[in-house]
Amino acid sequence: TLGSVCSDPSEATSFGSMLFRRGVSGARVVAPGQAKSCAGLKFASYGASTSNYTVPYATFACAIGVLPTDLEVLAKRLDQ
């Protein structure tokens, strides 16, 4: 989780922006408690798979055929 890095949801979304600026595609940052509604339906923790998460987290998409070097590039960009 991002709980050790981001203490509040606004910091988590900033982390997502930082990843995008560093050319990391396929990343998604979810901050708990960000409620949204669509077509009259309310989503308590929009973007999360459940409303029970209490800390922000990030997911990274990868595909069949990803190479170890691709993951090394991701790790380097995270370190930036």
Image (tube, rainbow, N blue to C red):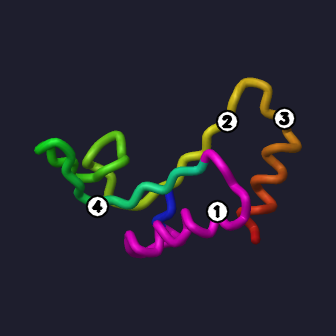
Q: What residue does disc 2 label?
A: 62
Label 4–label 2 contact, CB within 8 A: no
| Percent of width and height locating residue 1 | 50, 57
Residue at the limit of the structure toward the right, as seen here: 69
**In the image: residue 56, left or right of residue 26:** left
- Classed neighbour count for the residue bearing mark 3: other residues with Cα under 10 Å, few (<14), some (14–19), many (≥20): few
Residue pointed to by mark 3? 67
Q: Specify the segment rendered in magenta.
A: 4-26
* Left-right relation of 77 to 11: right
In this figure, which residue is indicated by the disc labeled 1? 19
The kind of residue on which mark 4 rests is Gln
Write the residue at 33% across / 52% down.
53
Q: Quadrant of residue 33?
A: bottom left
Task: Give percent across and percent down for residue 62.
Answer: 67, 36
Mark before the other along the chain sequence, 4 or 2: 4
Q: CA distance from mark 3 to mark 4?
A: 34 Å
The crowding category of the residue bearing disc 1, from other C-alpha atoms within 10 Å (few below 14, some 14 to 19, many at least 20), is many
Per the image, the residue denoted by label 4 is 34
Between residues 69 and 14, which one lies in front from this camera angle?
14
Q: Amino acid at mark 3?
A: Leu
- The mark tally for this picture is 4
Mark 1 or mark 3, earlier in chain: 1
Quarter occupied by residue 70: top right
N-terminal-most mark, 3 or 2 = 2
Q: Badges 3 and 2: C-beta atoms under 8 Å apart?
A: no
Q: Circle 2 sits in a helix, a strand or a loop, which is it?
A: loop
Mark 3 vs mark 2, CA separation in Å: 10 Å
Question: Between disc 1 and disc 4, whose residue precedes?
Answer: 1
Label 1 and label 3: CA atoms lie apart by 20 Å
- How packed is label 2: few (under 14 Cα within 10 Å), some, or many (20 or more)? few
